[in-house]
Amino acid sequence: MALYAVDLRDRVIRRVTQEYNGVDNKRFFLIEAGSAKQAWVKASRASATIGSADRVFQISIEGGAYMDWDKTKFGLLSAAGGAIVLAVIGFNWGGWVTTGSAEAMAKEIAANAVAERLGSICVAQANRDLQKGQKLSEMKGQDVWERGRYIEKQSWAIMPGEDKPDSRVADACAKQLAAKS
């Protein structure tokens, strides 16, 4: 950027390279611009807004390195508001989850998958029971949510190496036994 002295009356543009005291403030505009052409355009605009070139008018940095705080503040507040709205929509309806929630869901899915697989072992243990037919008819006579507890009482859901039955395995076993018979 350079400083130009623009005389609109005589149509003269002079580049000012150092401190310049020779500017007649009644006839010249001091304009900071990238080129003489830009300086002329800025001075013409300034002249039109002032009404005449006889008045003193100095443009230091037009369209340059200053910030309009009101516009910046509005932009920052809009960005923050948009981020909040995006987060609310994303976490409530967009399917986004936190790391903790994702880990909890993964553990739940893994535990259910293991219980489903161990349910087959439970069915095999139930098939070895000599009173299987009678116990299955008793199980089917119970409510669906009580069938898993019935299987736990029969010890079919106790896996090898375990001391007590697993309720998830018992529920999976009940579903498989009910589906088979």
Image (cartoon, helix red, strand yellow):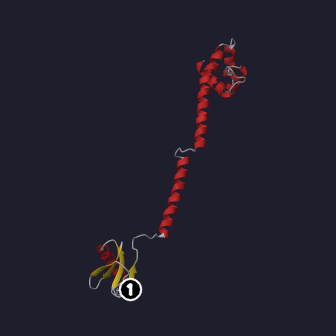
Which part of the image, by quadrant, shows the C terminus? top right
Q: Quadrant of residue 170?
A: top right
Q: Does residue 101 appear to the left or right of 162 in the view shown? A: left
Q: Quadrant of residue 123?
A: top right
Tell which of 158 and 136 is nearer to you.
Answer: 158
Considering every residue shown, the one lying at the far front of the view is 18
Instruction: Give the side of residue 135 with respect to residue 55, left or right.
Output: right
The residue at 54%/51% (across/down) is: 87
Which type of secondary structure does the marked residue at label 1 adopt?
loop
Q: Position of residue 144 (x, y in %)?
A: 66, 27
| Above-or-below relation of 95 to 76 | above
Out of 2 and 120, give the one closest to the viewer.
2
**Where is residue 145 drawn, in percent x and y?**
67, 29
Q: Amino acid at mark 1?
A: Val
Which residue is under mark 1? Answer: 56
Q: Is residue 165 above or below residue 55?
A: above
Question: Is 135 placed above or below 59 here?
Answer: above
**Residue at position x 60%, y 25% from top?**
116
**Count of labels shown?**
1
Q: Would you say 76 lies left or right of 136 here?
A: left
